Image (spheres, coloured by chain):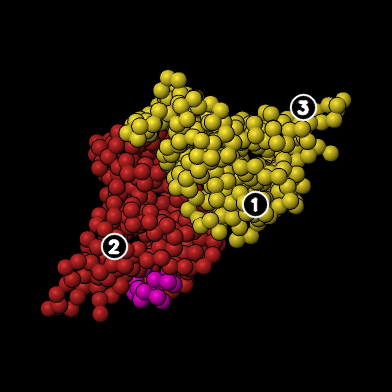
Chain colours: A red, B yellow
């Protein structure tokens, strides 16, 4: 039986991580859960987030048989990775440490910029993970980018202008602090959809690291050997995928395909309790 | 003892309604509750919203002695006004019916435009209230406007451009339906902060109705006589105001003054349960 990778997010932005995983591990089965009834996690306490995330992880492991978990949610990765690891008996990977590792590999100056949601920036989880890698990181919250992506303005002049304003502010702050950044980390699962605009907006020579891609690379290294089919087996032509949400299935189906790069299929509603 | 008006919102956008109330009833006492721990209401079921709103209303009446309630939240006004009225023994006023009444008074053509959040538009509560007034209403969700206001870009070229795009789409849709609108209703408690930009963006001759102002006018008509101080009494020079929130007190204090037009003072944290 092909092993199942469970992928968890508070919403459906984590479908960008799932997309990157499917690209690298097309022979795996995937179960994605968006805890849409209880989002946004970002405004809730660490204890509450840990409980929600643990319940979601248990659903993926116990009900869907996931043998590996990828936490495709920056807030849960920042605040609840330990709680999830304690709650389930399978390997668990977050998005933040892989993003910092990829930044380390890409940076020559050792100075990196991180853009993310307000909640992720306030947690300073990227700065801490970068420090562990010997990097200096300057973080900036960009609260307009998620709504712009969800509005579908992913290649829109307004979005390009908003990105220009945010990056100008961030580069000015970096200069004021005497930093010489050469890497920009996209620290939110919605931002991969803005990657083309980001690549055009950064200063020449600055590399853009997508933490969704970085997490999928890390998953391949960590789980890949155990997921590769036995020699001689034919891999499935299409990924085997089930998507679950705790609420707002319509919005998930409507917007999700944009993040996943293919139709989500029918999204199944699950009740994890209050 | 000066009567207390309780004002309730799922967040702090309803402080624009409180501001309009204070302007008209400076001699009242006010207790404002933002149920910030459980927002956004817009993505939740009617039953859940009704329970949250009823609990919030009971806090204002039982704990704070409110003798009147203003529901300064479009979602709760649309989906839970009956439930709130059943839950407390005091008069309760929402924001939607006053907005429709003001539109009726302002419109000569009988056709009106309404802009609001996605959740309010999906409820079609404004369209129904307008129909009761003999008006034809065309509603449009403008999901970028709340994030732009919360980012503080209330007089910003990007916001002006987003408003222009939304209103162009809405006016084109109205023309396609053979409507001749002469009123724009701002059906979200965040939008009063954008009123100057809105006034510049609408076609010549189109009036802008602010549902926060309309609700305050309605409150003055409904409660005003009972709140006016006895003859000879001196009214308080400053409004007597207490603000409560169920979470995220920092964000409330940081952004709230922009909505209220004065400092919120210390915001008190209350626990209404899960």
Rounded to the nearest angstrom, the CA distance separating label 1 from label 3 is: 32 Å
Estimate the x, y position of residue A208 in percent, counting from the top left. Answer: 28, 45
Confirm or deny contact between disc 2 and disc 1 (CB under 8 A): no
- What is the chain letter for disc 1? B
Estimate the x, y position of residue B34 in percent, counting from the top left. Answer: 61, 46
Q: Is residue A121 left or right of residue B249?
A: left
Residues B21 and A39: in front is B21
Read off the magenta span: A57-70
- What is the chain letter for disc 2? A
Q: Which mark is residue A265?
A: 2
Residue A66 in the magenta stretch? The answer is yes
Rounded to the nearest angstrom, the CA distance separating label 2 from label 3 is: 61 Å
Mark 2 vs mark 1: same chain? no
Residue A231's place in the image compared with B180, above or below, is below
Residue A170 in the magenta stretch? The answer is no
Say which element carries label 3. loop
Estimate the x, y position of residue A11 in percent, counting from the top left. Answer: 41, 56
Label 1, residues with CA under 10 Å away: few <14, some 14-19, many ≥20: many
| The N terminus of chain B lies in quadrant | top right
For residue A228, say whether it is visible: yes
Q: Which mark is residue B84?
A: 1
Of badges 1 and 3, nearer the viewer stands: 1
Q: Which mark is residue A122?
A: none
Q: Residue at x 35, y 63 (%)?
A: A267
Residue carrying label 3: B237
């Amino acid at each position: 039986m092909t092993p199942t990778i469970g992928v968890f997010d508070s919403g459906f932005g984590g479908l960008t991580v799932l997309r990157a995983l499917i690209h690298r591990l097309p022979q795996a089965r995937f179960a994605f859960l968006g805890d849409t009834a209880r989002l946004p996690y970002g405004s809730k306490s660490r204890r509450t987030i840990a409980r929600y995330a643990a319940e979601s992880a248990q659903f993926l492991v116990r009900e869907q048989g996931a043998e590996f978990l990828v936490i495709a949610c920056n807030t849960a990765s920042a605040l609840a990775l330990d709680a999830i690891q304690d709650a389930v008996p399978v390997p668990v990977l977050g998005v933040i440490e892989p993003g910092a590792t990829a930044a380390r590999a890409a940076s020559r100056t050792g100075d990196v910029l991180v853009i993310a949601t307000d909640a992720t920036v306030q947690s300073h989880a990227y700065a801490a993970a970068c420090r562990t890698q010997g990097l200096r990181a300057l973080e900036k919250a960009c609260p307009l980018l998620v709504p712009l992506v969800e509005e579908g303005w992913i290649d829109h002049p307004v979005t390009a202008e908003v990105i220009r304003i945010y990056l100008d502010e961030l580069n000015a702050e970096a200069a004021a602090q005497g930093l010489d950044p050469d890497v920009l980390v996209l620290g939110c699962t919605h931002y991969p959809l803005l990657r083309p605009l980001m690549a055009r907006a950064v200063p020449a020579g600055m590399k853009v690291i997508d933490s969704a891609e970085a997490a999928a690379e890390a998953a391949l290294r960590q789980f890949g050997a155990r997921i590769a089919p036995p020699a001689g087996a034919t891999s499935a032509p299409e990924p085997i995928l089930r998507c679950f949400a705790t609420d707002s299935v319509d919005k998930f189906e409507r917007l999700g395909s944009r993040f996943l790069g293919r139709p989500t299929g029918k999204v199944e509603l699950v009740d994890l309790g209050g």
